[in-house]
Image (spheres, grey):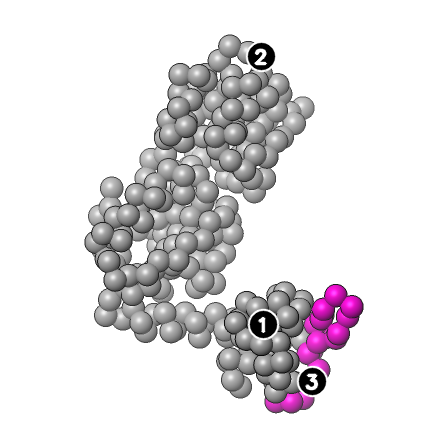
Amino acid sequence: MDSNLLKVFVAVSEHKSISLGALELGFTQSNVTLRIKQLEKTLGYTLFHRVPKGVILTQEGEKLYPLAKEIVQKVENAAVQMKNMKEQTLLRIGTSQANASIRLSSFIETLQHDFSSMSLEIYTGGTPSVVEKLLAYQIDIAFITGAPKLLDIEVLNQFNDDLYLVEPKNKLCANTLIGYREKSTHFDYLKANEERLGNKTYQTMIVEHYEVMLACVKAGMGKAFLSKKIIEKFGYVDALKLTKLEQNECDLQTRLVCRKDNVPFIADYLRALR
């Protein structure tokens, strides 16, 4: 079975649209339609139903999708690994948003200086989604929050993010917890800490911009839990009340990790970074 046909099938499946799948792949719509028909002829099944807004998978298509996605990912990863056998020509980096704000720019600058011929790809998201992409071989290394719980993951480096509860300095604080995204390790810890203190009536607010988040805290709209480096970056250290929380057994430091079976060629270099 041609993995290129499976790649087309996966793209159309994920977009639920032949035209959008073609756009992602850089093919014409007629080319994608032809390849889908070729795959259907090979398998002997119709894979898509046409609907007013695009296409949906048939029962046979639903069964094929996870298998096809796994094959496509493995083929793409094999191509990347073969390119990187003797030197790192491409490094795919995943990172939490907090880490991106703290150290990603300097990390990229250092890599570009020391490995000028190496191409970089960046993916940002919450730790769970970054780990998911790492396990699926879609990225090579990842900055994640906390110690990895899976045996498939190897820690290359660790960083101290110096985390603080931030509250308004000279105003009453609304009983609202402010986070960057709902699915966030830091935000989950803040909510759990408030509940341990007996606060079960708090509201939540999601603000996907750290400077705006800090401005909201200063205005008395709520409290947040952030790295001091982010607070310093936007000039709010003296404008807010900062409290170091006891994390006890909760580990919220940043790790740079990779898959044990997909260790980057420059792993020793990454282990030595500070």
Whole-number angstrom distance, CA of label 1 to CA of label 2 = 54 Å
Q: Which quadrant, please, contains the C terminus?
A: top left
Q: Give the residue pinned by disc 3.
A: 45
Q: Give the residue pinned by disc 2.
A: 172
Of callouts 3 and 2, which one flags the residue occurring earlier in the amino acid sequence? 3
Q: Which mark is residue 110?
A: none
Whole-number angstrom distance, CA of label 3 to CA of label 2 = 64 Å
Residue visible at 51% across and 10% down in the picture: 170
Of callouts 1 and 2, which one flags the residue occurring earlier in the amino acid sequence? 1
Asked whether disc 3 touches disc 1, contact meaning CB atoms under 8 Å apart, the reply is: no
User: Is the residue 262 above or below the residue 182 in the image?
Assistant: below
Question: Which amino acid is tagged 2?
Answer: Leu
Q: Give the residue pinned by disc 1.
A: 22
Residue 32's x, y, as percent?
A: 60, 78
109 relative to 16 in the view: left or right: left
| Element assignment for label 3 | loop
91 relative to 110 in the view: left or right: right
Near-viewer residue (187 or 214):
214
Give the residue furthest to the right: 52
* Viewer can see residue 67: no
Q: Is residue 51 magenta-colored?
A: yes
Residue visible at 75% across and 74% down in the picture: 50
